[in-house]
Image (cartoon, rainbow, N blue to C red):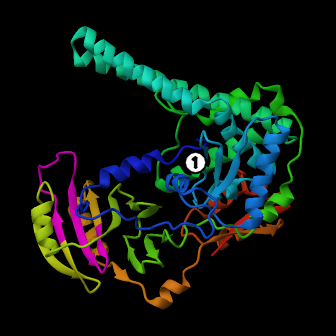
Amino acid sequence: MFFRSLAVLLALLALAGGCTPSNAPQTTVAAAGAPAGGALPSDVQRLVGPVYRAPELEALVDRVGQRLVTRGGLNGSYRFFILDQPVANAHALPSGYVFVTRGLLALLDDEAELAAAMGHELGHITERHAAQREQQRRHIMDQAIDAAMKSGSVSVGRSVARDGLVKLRSYSRDQELEADRVGVTTLTRAGFRGDAMITLIEKLQRQTRLEEQLMGLPESRDPSALSTHPGAADRLVALNTLPVARKTGESDRRAYLAAIDGLSVDDSPEEGFVRGPAFLHPIMRIAFAMPRDFRLYNDHDGVLGIGSDRSLMYFSCKAGTFEGRLDDWMRNRMQPTPTDIHSTEIGGAEAAIGARPRGSDTGLGQVRYVLIRRPDGVCYFNLLSDGPDRDRRIEAMVQAASGFRDLTVAEAGALRSYRLKILPGGTPAATLAARMPYPDFRLERLLALNGVDSAAELAQRDQVKTVDP
């Protein structure tokens, strides 16, 4: 995988979990449907998600990918796809499928950077990194089992496994650097500029800093030896030692920007939209809003909210039939059994609210569970607050969750994805930032989108990327 996901978000999402109705199959808050005439085999699509349908842009991605294969001297058959995901990422399967997300395409500036991203993923395939990692993992497990049997101690086996898995993480870091080296060689053989891998990593570095700002986190440092991936600084140092990275070549910036003009930079309607502290789903026709200081993160399985005081909210829905009253379900099915359970009504529907018993987990502060019956199942909120003002805060969060409601047909029909807009240069950065349809960090978002660090750098661009509501 080329670009790390938001591991911090995943860890927080796991912490926020608790109330998960279990007598019905999971359905996502944003059930992603198969694209019309999807070209991916069903088993592959189940693994990676739906593709983004935009014929001209799909043709560009395939053309650049096939150019890497043919002119880069690669053997084998490869297929290139755009995934319908707003997060910047790229990855590949050993079977020859290479994927870039539309979130990554929005960050890139030209065809050379696209070639760099796909060249890195092709490097993972050609060097058989996935197979090597699996072989190494099996070897570690065999060593651990052998050590446990010979010593008669499970603890010895666990120690061997732990040490081996630490080494495996380092092994993966080496593979990432190797994929960079192979990728930059492939893209220069194909005629693209060699420094595209460098400018790509710099763009991803800026995007990471922006994400940390949005979450209110301190700026990250390079990963430790326990990290699966090398830090951007390590990768840039390694690339700058390669003469091939300074090789001149094609970029085709103007053609690339024309191709991504109008690209969605939002969640798909099937996933629902985050609008400031509010979440609105035009397909399910539901909406709620957390307190104003909350930042929401939409994921395929649900919505995570993080308050300025690190309070947490997790929202999701399950399909199925839930027999009986929801407050009885809480009493009889949840462990540990919540306290202060009471039945209520939210948005005109049956609901139940309960609290996590004090002392059931000393690592948690105030926790509330909110269940809301839907025609096709149940939606639920897990709420957590552990700050100095947690008692008042948790009640404010419960009140916000109690504002859950149905969208009208007109409201749902008016919701649209935010889209990329390419404009001629010359407009002051402050003016462009003011047009960005976000409640905060507008200038920072604009600069990261264009891969620059300052308004002065942006002013030098003859074409600028913005976002239209």
Residue 360 colored magenta?
Answer: yes
- Can you give x and y, in whole percent of width and height, for residue 298 in the image? 46, 62
Q: Is residue 110 visible?
A: no
Q: Is residue 360 left or right of residue 424?
A: left
Left or right: 234 in relation to 68:
left
The residue under label 1 is which amino acid type?
Arg
Residue that appears at 10% across and 67% down: 340
**Horizontal and vertical percent for residue 450?**
72, 56
Q: Is residue 455 left or right of residue 345?
A: right
Question: Relative to residue 405, is residue 50 depicted above or below?
Answer: above
Q: Give the mark count.
A: 1
Q: Position of residue 172 (x, y in %)?
A: 54, 29
| Front one among 14 and 425 | 14
Q: Residues within 10 Å of mark 1 (few under 14, many from 20)?
A: some
Is residue 381 visible to the viewer in this orientation of the structure? yes
Q: Residue at x 31, y 74 (%)?
A: 400
* 69 vs 433, nearest the viewer: 69
Q: Is residue 128 above or below residue 38?
A: above
Asked if 20 appears above or below 47 in the picture, the reply is: below
Q: Which of the 4 image quadrants contains residue 287?
A: bottom left
**Left/right of residue 411 with respect to residue 256 in the rendered view:** left
Mark 1 sits on what residue? Answer: 209
**Which of 386 and 108 lies nearest the eye of the viewer?**
108
Q: Quarter of the image containing the N terminus?
A: top right
Q: Which residues are magenta?
A: 353-380
- Which quadrant holds the C terminus? bottom right
